[in-house]
Image (cartoon, helix red, strand yellow):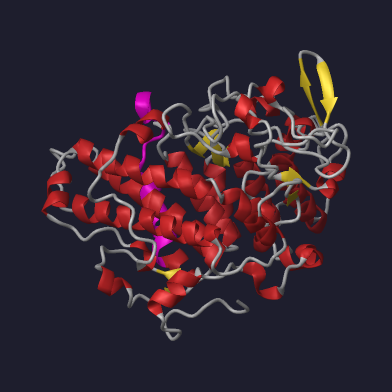
Amino acid sequence: MKKIIGTLALSVILMLSCSKEFISIDPVATVTTDLVYKTDKDFQDALTNTYAVFQTVYSDMWQFGDLRGDDTKLGLVGNLGCSDMDKFILNSDAGVLSSAWRNYYIIINRANYILTKIASADPAVVTHKDRFIGETKFLRALAYFNLVRIFGDVPLVTTVLSIDESYKVAREKTDKIYSDLIIPDLKVAETSLPLVYTGADVGRATMGAAKALLGKVYLTTHDFVNAESKLQELTVAPFTYNLLPKYNDLFDYTKNEHHAEYIFDIEYEEGINEGSTFTTQFSLSFQASGALSNVLISAFGLPASTVGSGGDQGCPTDELFNAYDPADLRKGINVAKSYTYNGVTTPISPTGIGSFTLKYMVSSVKLNDSKANWKVIRFADVLLMYAEALNENNKTALALTTLNRVRTRAGLTGYTGLTQTDARDKILNERRFELYLEGHRWFDLLRTGLAYSICQPLGMKTYNTVFPIPLAQIEVVNNPDIFPQNEGY
């Protein structure tokens, strides 16, 4: 799957649109697109190109999910845009906002094209028709889930629109997007997708991925009863998910990445211009001397051009570093203050950066071309969500049993006898320690209602629970009655 994404291109219908076009409408259907959508392979290729756009949007997910929260900061040379994100002063003209909006709607519009065309497809010719419908709806639901978590109310688009029609689409309430699209799409996906794939298809969305995302949606909307039920399904047959014995193996890219804990990743592959930027972004540029140097080159096999080019991004805060139990086996990779190579341990600068993450450090040939994937959902996340739902449903003892599976893997003693309130705090903290820099912390704080109390000292205002709508979109529509800016911006 990783390599397929980089080798396919539907050059006419799947072209990126001009950034000035409202919600990035793809070109209106033509004779060319009618010719494209005919065979099983046509639809599979179209889906592969829809997956490919997620590579772009998830390259910035750490900014929305981690940097916006309390556990992540910039290093010594972080860029200005990221600094504004970190300080809660991001303006509506910020590139990261425009890019997210544009690319999520490219995904949505590609999905709508596919669904429109496949509706009349002959199952004898398009032999995987039901699977493709489920796969398309999974991707559309994931795009909308991220959109509403980032921007709040957004246009709900379920059909192929012309450019002129798109200007008249109002922002829709988040609750309606959940009830009318995200949840129904995922219900179709969970009944249409296969349990597993083989060969080149490994990496596509599965039944388990759809159920896990649906469980996360239920949790986000505080439907704890359905969240518990859906997430519980992933812990029993026919699913065989399990925690890897060693936490560090999750981030050892010399091993199979589609392991027992894997549920759904955004897939990247080096060497074919489909690599991720994470290794470069999260590596460092400064050593203890303060001079630009090869901090991580020898230790992690990074390209020589990494010298002075590390992004200094995604650095853990001192507060997070100190919050880890010293016995926690995750600490050394999540919030490292040193690196070890050939048996020699080298500390990084004791000032300035403080610590960094090793989660995405992998040998690569050139900058911004890493094989490190972005883990959208893995089984530890499912267990912690399941524990949260159980606890909210007054099943605290069972919640602790589930929580302790994650703690035990980390080398820690399990919890017993906690009150529901104490368990709620422990589960949230465990997500903090387990899922650092995987795009969860900010959304966890929003879901649990703790964002303002925790982040107000960092500059958060009450209206910062959503980001501003990109200025270009506001200007193009120019109609505050149907397309207002979010409050406070």
Up/down of 286 relative to 155, above or below: above
Up/down of 147 relative to 50, above or below: below
Q: Is residue 57 shown left or right of residue 113?
A: right
| Residue 199 falls inside the magenta stretch | yes
Q: Is residue 187 visible?
A: no
Residue 430 occupies quadrant: top right
Q: Which residues are magenta?
A: 180-202
If the image is split into quadrants, where does the C terminus sit? bottom right
The residue most toward the bottom is: 481
- Image x and y of residue 450, in percent: 74, 64
Question: Residue 70 or 459: which is nearer the viewer?
Answer: 459
- Image x and y of residue 152, in percent: 53, 69
If the image is split into quadrants, where does the N terminus sit? top left
- Image x and y of residue 226, in percent: 54, 56
- The residue positioned 47% from the left and 74% from the top of the image is 173
Q: Is residue 131 visible?
A: yes
